[in-house]
Amino acid sequence: MFRRLRAMPYTKKKELYGLLFVLPWIIGFILFFAKPLLTSFIYAFQNLELTPQGLKGSFIGWENFEYAIYKDPSFIREAVNSFINMLYGVPLILVYSLFVAVMIKHKFPGRGFMRAVSFLPVIIASGVLMQILKEDVFSQGMRGGAESVYLFAGAGMNGILTELGLGPQLIEIFNNVISRIFDLTWRSGVQVLLFLAGLHTIPGYLYEASSLEGARPWEQFWKVTLPMLTPMMLLNIVYTIIDTFTDYGNGVIMMIYNTAFSQVRFGYSSALAWLYCLAIAAFLGLVYVLLKKRIVYLKD
């Protein structure tokens, strides 16, 4: 087996390594996600009722989907708001994460600490704290609370800003900026890590050749760094779009959750989830079509 692996061409080895990396995800999907996914698809075409024997469903065809598209104004409104938030949120996250990755790429005192800080939100978000935050947001939504909650609010500074003579509108703008800066930092951990990995894969001879041609650091960034990062940029765009659409504070996600567990309409909530999933898939396909010709790959 090892002899065959050694004799295998380099391109085949890369394909094999890629398959080995995604194999745990494939196994996990088959074992834990495939059956619930199929069940939710079946539920989307049914009217489900709670009975002493459990859930009882009756086939109603496309009624859940037709109601969501033509008769439920809340779903369309929340979906449009999600797309609008994504259109300005994703570029901000990408620009911020690229800026941080470029800053912490080079050696300087405290670089390890800064890298740890930039990735800290990802570690916290996968733990108990984020679970508590999610439960709090969902409980607020079920009680009719706010549609989205930022992890940090600048409302505590209202008194200071008022004493400085700022008007209510300026105070509201200032609070929104502070909230979004913290939220931006919180959502950029994975993107910073991916951009940092991409920066370290750019060959040094490209910078040496550009320096010999008289290119300055600013020109090298636009002519060398940015083009070489386009594959990683596409990956980050896809990841950020999905992360934005599936965020716990997203209005559509909260609507699906509340429809299922507050209104006990599992069939309709499944239809909403599938419609939302198809909309995200279509948007990702459009993004890929628009960007695939602009991706630069370094040939071996």
Image (cartoon, rainbow, N blue to C red):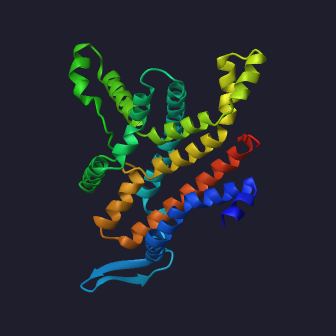
Q: Nearer the viewer, residue 233 or 263?
A: 233
Q: Residue furthest bottom?
A: 53
Q: Residue furthest front?
A: 3
* Residue 3 placement: quadrant: bottom right
Q: Is residue 233 above or below residue 238?
A: above
Q: Is residue 295 above or below residue 78?
A: above
Q: Viewed as shown, does residue 272 lie left or right of 49? A: right
Residue depicted at x 24% and y 85%: 52
- Residue 70, percent across and down? 49, 63
* Residue 21 placement: quadrant: bottom right
Residue depicted at x 47% and y 49%: 243
- Residue 238, percent across and down? 57, 48
Q: Nearer the viewer, residue 202 or 261?
A: 202
Q: Nearer the viewer, residue 287 or 50?
A: 287
Q: Is residue 62 above or below residue 182?
A: below
Q: Is residue 61 above or below residue 14?
A: below
Q: Residue furthest right?
A: 213
Residue depicted at x 30% and y 19%: 167
Residue depicted at x 75% and y 59%: 7
